[in-house]
Image (cartoon, rainbow, N blue to C red):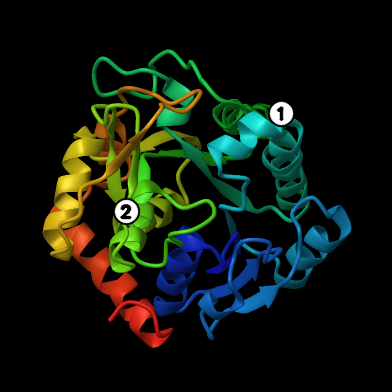
Amino acid sequence: MRAIVTGGAGFIGSHLTDALVARGDEVVVVDSLSHGRRERVNSGATLAEVDIRDRDALEGAFRDLEPKACFHLAAQADVRVSVNDPAFDADVNVIGTARVLEAARKHGTQVVFSSTGGAIYGECEEPAAETAERRPLAPYGTSKLAGEEYLATWNRLYGTSHVALRYGNVYGPRQDPHGEAGVVAIFFGRLAEGRAFTIFGDGRQTRDYVYVGDVVAATIAAAGQAGGVFNVGTRRETSVLELADACRRVSGVDLEPDFAAPRLGELQRSFLDFSLAERELGWRPETDLDSGLAATWDSIRAEGTAGGGAN
């Protein structure tokens, strides 16, 4: 298969690119490198340094490859940035997605869109199904939901079969412990430096942590489906306090966390029901939290040693 991976120099996108190349696909990575790293792009893929908002450059990448699938992972993914600058968040996540959809339409390409679960559903009293009420608490969730609606509109308008995947809290190797990092990478990054990490609020807020390898498997499984929206999570909620204990246990670094005031727009409970993906995609998460954390810690330690950091 010929495929484009937008955001393919980033955390999830680079793992996805590796998996596609490993099975023999011809892959072009479209990434502005504003957050992605060139060295993460698989040597078997081609890198096009393109911002998804640049219509002409983006369409050029599609025209050169004529891809069957576009895995659209490029995004503004920081909730805090979305609160502080909602116009920028919408520019990347809404306008950028519309650009991708138009380029895909002109070349008969299916789009598999990386959306978000927790940020779209809002507070969850039970594992959220795809039919649950959508109540974003931050502009990031709203912009991702708008992207989903654009996909659905294109499907109705043009008869396409684009698919949206609502990811849980993805973690794993290559997640940068700085910048837009998820909490697992932040915790491990601090522990690798011998520094205490910070928990915002009381730490009882819960999330659905899903390993990046499982997310890649779900994303590939979505290609070729006849449209739809699917949750990609574990149906398990883990509190930040429980995660902190697990990170300290796996790393062997026993530092007590600091606590700070809760952040604006932060959810208290978020976890996803993956039953639909199990039925329709034949997918279910395979990596338990301790195993995923161990792989992540090994990766951070290896990178720190190579860079002269943690030893």
Circles 1 and 2, Cβ within 8 Å, touching? The answer is: no
Q: Quadrant of residue 261?
A: top left
The C terminus: image quadrant: bottom left
Residue 97: x, y in percent?
69, 42
Residue 72's place in the image compared with 261, above or below, is below
Vertical order, 182 against 268 (above or below): below
- Residue bearing the label numbered 2: 187
Residue type pointed to by label 2 = Phe
Q: Which residue bears the numbered disc 1?
A: 157
Residue 89 at x, y percent in the picture: 69, 37
Q: Tell me where residue 148 sits by quadrant.
A: top right
Could you say whether the residue bearing mark 2 is in a helix, strand or loop? helix
- Asked if 62 appears above or below 82 in the picture, the reply is below
Left or right side of 93 for 61:
right
Q: Alpha-carbon neighbours of circle 2 within 10 Å: few (<14), some, or many (≥20)?
A: many
Give the residue drawn at x 43%, y 13%: 133
Residue at screen point 17% across, 55% down = 248
